[in-house]
Amino acid sequence: MKKILLLGIACGLATVALAENVAPMILPEFYTMNISPDGRWIGSNDGNEYTMIYDRVGGGEPVMYSETMLGNGNAIALNGMAVGATFSDRPVLMYEEEVLFPAVFDNYSLAGLHGITADGKRVCGIVSNSKSGGSTDEDNQMYLPIYAEVVDGEVGEPVVLPTPEKDFFGTVPQYCSAVWISNDGKTILGQVVANSGMFIAPIIYKQNEAGEWSYTLPTESLFNTENLPLPVYPGEFDLVPPEYVDYMTEENAAAYQAAIDEFIASGYTSPYPNAEDYMTQEAIEEYNKATEVYNEAAMKYNEALTKYFEDFYAVMDCSVNIVQNGQTMSSDGMTVACAAEFTEESEGFTPIKYYVTYIFNLEDGTYKEIKSDVKNIIPGQICANGIVIGNAVPSFDDTVPPLSYVLTADAKDYVALEEYLEGVNPESAKWMKENLNAELVVAYDEETFEPMYEDFIMTGHAMASDDMTVISGGVMAYLMEDEDRYPYSFMSYVIDGTNVTGVDGVAADNGAVKALRNGLLLVKGNVESIKVYDLSGRQVFAAGNASGIVDTKLGNGLYVVTYVDAEGQNVASKVRF
């Protein structure tokens, strides 16, 4: 296997180069599903049996990896290595036009890789449980979450992460997964799927300084908030119903079978044989008694099963049940966002489904709930500045296409991606409105059956670099019904995200202003009108004349500082506290 150069580490965290300005472009037959932290490498899965990786810096045609699909987490590292699996559930690394099959997974019937650290040194995923069907609770989980080290392109032996013995309902989990992994590889986000398969909860695995792993369940306090009795599963009904032949002599049973064969041979025209004609009166009574016992047991079981489901759905109604793979984690492992599914009554026969976003602060254990006016948003990514990119899946009545939305750190609701860009990069917003607009049929008039149209900006499934400077989205081009304009089934756009005023790096010394740590700025001489913006474009600090040490009281991270220098020139630069 080829040797793979891994990226350097500073203070245990991967250093991420900032992206240069991006000229808007279209990638034909490409559906963005993943992106590297610096925005250089963009990954596509469009339902076809291959992955494509586009190198935004190197250009050229995307590299195609046949019979593979990307992992469900942060699946692309800074060096362009991507993780995933084949369609036959065999884990792969995709790198420099080669599909690499780690031999350490050869003994597993099923496995897959979902996340990779920015430096490419650690991966996470799932493996089949070789002990499945055994006598212990752990044996009865179908799949187990794992992580593994990567050294020179070789994946080490997978290490199984600790999992709960019971799910929230007190039964053995169907399986637990590991999907998103932090930059330092010490925090992993997965999900616990209940034994029923109908309830899912996020799980956070953390590794301490001694190398020991533990887990927490962020939604534990949001389960069964009404403290209802947990459902008791009655088990499988394993009684066998009595059969007539069991109460016949061998001779009579053979005669009875011969009569049935004759009935079939006659083309089902002769009378069907009466089983009791081949039984003694005593045997008939024994059969009837056994049937009564069986029917009574079946009735009691059905009552118990009905009670179980009544209790189960009652508990579900007062619990946060997240969407399958509907969760994401920030690169520092501090924040998790997930979508929970709820239903509400409707005038029709089918209740209306909707999603609520929950954002968990893993440092202090707090969370916030976002009930968006757009009811079908699933968070797909949290960027370094706390911005959540949400992807609105096609509406439940299939009238609205996939669209992307942005939730800034302090906002109470999502805004459409193009609306967000109007505030931070008007040029990109303008390009979107000119190039990704489409008029789609959303309904039909009940009387005339004429189509009813609505205008959309087709932002599709969007992902961004960790600093939001590069945004790429996958679009179902066939929905746009304009083959002259876009003759593709799928396509993706790549645009500038946050406007960083052309500053192309984080300088150690930005002219008259130098970032220290803990929100402190060192101002050399005197500057006027100093302002600090976060990468969503919000002004987070301002001062008039400033010199010496200035305490902005901002948290560590990346910001844009503007000021007027001694020569009266307007200066803008990025700084990192």
Image: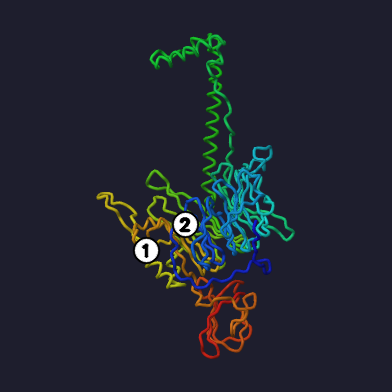
551 left or right, relative to 379: right
Residue drawn at point x = 53 percent, y = 18 percent: 243
In front of the other: 448 or 31: 31
Residue drawn at point x = 37 percent, y = 53 percent: 399
| Location of residue 315 with respect to 506 vertically, above or below | above
How crowded pointer 1 is (Cα within 10 Å; few <14, some 14-19, many 20+) is rated as some
Toward which corner of the image does residue 478 lie, by quadrant?
bottom left
**Residue sitting at the far bottom:** 567
In front of the other: 370 or 500: 500
Expressed as whole percent of the image width and height from the top left, the position of residue 421 reads 45, 69
Expressed as whole percent of the image width and height from the top left, the position of residue 101 reads 62, 51
Let me know if residue 380 appears in the view.
Answer: no
Circles 1 and 2, Cβ within 8 Å, touching? The answer is: no
In front of the other: 327 or 428: 428
Residue pointed to by mark 2:
377
Residue pointed to by mark 1:
437
Kindly identify the amino acid type of the residue bearing the numbered disc 2: Ile
**Residue sitting at the far left:** 448
The N terminus - image quarter: bottom right
Expressed as whole percent of the image width and height from the top left, the position of residue 371 reads 48, 58
Helix, strand or loop for disc 2: strand
Kindly identify the amino acid type of the residue bearing the numbered disc 1: Asn
| Location of residue 37 with respect to 134 vertically, above or below | below
How crowded pointer 2 is (Cα within 10 Å; few <14, some 14-19, many 20+) is rated as many
Residue drawn at point x = 31 percent, y = 57 percent: 453
Helix, strand or loop for disc 1: strand
Of the residues under marks 1 and 2, which one precedes in the sequence?
2
| Location of residue 318 with respect to 484 vertically, above or below | above
In front of the other: 285 or 329: 329
**Residue sitting at the far right:** 210
**Mark sitting on residue 551:** none
